[in-house]
Image (cartoon, rainbow, N blue to C red):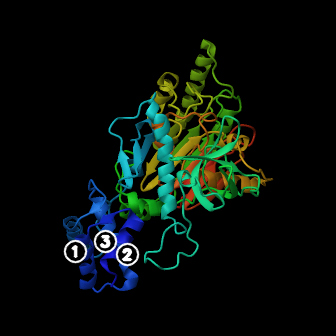
Amino acid sequence: MAPPTLTSIEFQKKYMLALQVEAAQFILNILEEHSVAEDEISDSLEHLAKGWMAQEYDSNLVTKPQIQRVYELLQVDSREVMGNGGAGTYALGEEDELDPSQHLVFIDAFDMPRWMFSVERHTFEKSAAPPSMGGNPASRAAFLRDRYHVIKQVVLRNEHFTPAVVPGLSQGDMNKLTSTKNLLGRAGQTFMLLGMLAHEPDGKLCLEDVDGKVLLDVSGVAPAQGLITEGCFVLVEGEYTDEDTLKVWQIGHPPSERRLASRSIFGHIDFLGKGATTPAEDEEYARRIQDFPHLAFVVISDLWLDYPKTLVGLRAVLDKCVETGFTPFLFIFCGNFTSKGIGSGGAGVKQYTDNFSALGDLLSSYKDIAASSHFLFVPGPLDPWGSSTLPRAAIPEQFVSRLKARLPRAVFLSNPCRIKFFGQEIVIFREDLMARVLRNLVGVKQEIEAPELKRYLVQMVIDQEHLSPLPLTVQPILWEFDPALRLYPTPTTLILADKHERYEETYEGCHIFNPGSFIGNSFGFSTYFPYNGRSEES
């Protein structure tokens, strides 16, 4: 049986929890009492750790009384499960008749709580003060430090950066991160660093972390496998030189973490502000959603209401729905809802308002769809009162009041926004991200084929755990609302609505797709099926 020290190491390594000696000995006694086999110890520790985190204690130090309490609760749950014939004790009963609409939750970016990663406690802490639109000088640096710490804790948990549990055993191919402050006086040595790419005033490329920065010499780096821009957090490996420069050999994105792994550690945290569910409840939701294979989300982007053929094309889509007896559960309409903006004159404002009224008339004329479907509207860069700053507020009420009067199930949210549907988290982001990224690549550029280009963009946003890993000079962000753009834990589904051609990819368990633009003669869009978490071209 593993000694208490190894039990403590396991808790600290995987769950960022510290065990008191008495608590570790108590766990060891439990394992011995139940004659837990060596290959089952890890699972047993995982049950205890998750049970402890569900109690939401104020410290990451696990005491003996706390772990005793968790053990007692797990025993009670086990007896209840056995009493129910193994059915489990979830919020959803086996015979409950579900109404999917009761499990559809919309989350505006400006309503999300501000969770910041605490280096001292190795967990997320909720900001006491609500985020401010203007922020303060401290927020300017704080949100970048927070991005760094969120990514770093993922990197350190990765198998290639995790030290051996038993001291003295071979470390194999384990990597070790070094801070910029530890480079001075160590010329000729090789290091690996994690930091953000930036440019000095003179145009030289450097890497910044929380301790400082170092100039980079990337002349010897082979063309990067992927898309890397200024503002990305990257892992670099190279030799520190006498010129106080890191001569880089390799550069790449940090490893990401699957949603299930993140949820096993931080499943008790309500990142969306709509009530946290446990990983066990998410599994039950995933099972129950199989009962609704017919539920579908229709996702349409670039619905130019000032383009004469748009409503004609949309009417054809709705006619096809009626003809086939298919009623989408949710329509997701992404901007731009105008081809050229509304300008500053009254005529443009009136035309924009009238266009939404005409859309409301069209949708409400299909009685069954209007009564049964939900409608979500997400603004694009040209929609009012859009600025280049993220997140963007929802389209103002004055433009859409008549449409909402006709469609009581219509919801207007920010860009980006999120949907919580059963146990799924779906992120919707309308931005021409591909073009922005390609304009701001750093390092040696390579010729990239179209299929690889889409895959690299998907990999970039998931590995960066952020919707816009670009410098503020390229993409301004409201500092204190930066967590609303965070992709950690990785969502179930990510809709990257872009004027770039349509694509769909699945990366690290997350399904990402771009529905393409509805404009033109093709009237293309995507249909998403929650029961299997996949989309298809329509």
Q: Looking at the image, which residue is at 23% across and 84% down?
A: 33
Front tag of 1 and 2: 2
Residue linked to disc 1: 79
Badge 3 element: loop
Say whether marks 1 and 3 touch (CB < 8 Å). Answer: no
Q: Residues within 10 Å of mark 2 (few under 14, many from 20)?
A: few
Residue linked to disc 2: 43
- Identified by mark 2, the residue type is Asp
Which image quadrant is residue 65 in? bottom left
Mark 1 → mark 3, Cα distance in angstroms: 11 Å
Mark 1 → mark 2, Cα distance in angstroms: 19 Å
Q: Is residue 322 above or below residue 94?
A: above
Q: Position of residue 122 (x, y in %)?
A: 38, 56
Badge 2 element: helix
Q: In this view, does 274 lie to the left or right of 185?
A: left
Front tag of 1 and 3: 1
Q: Residues within 10 Å of mark 3 (few under 14, many from 20)?
A: few
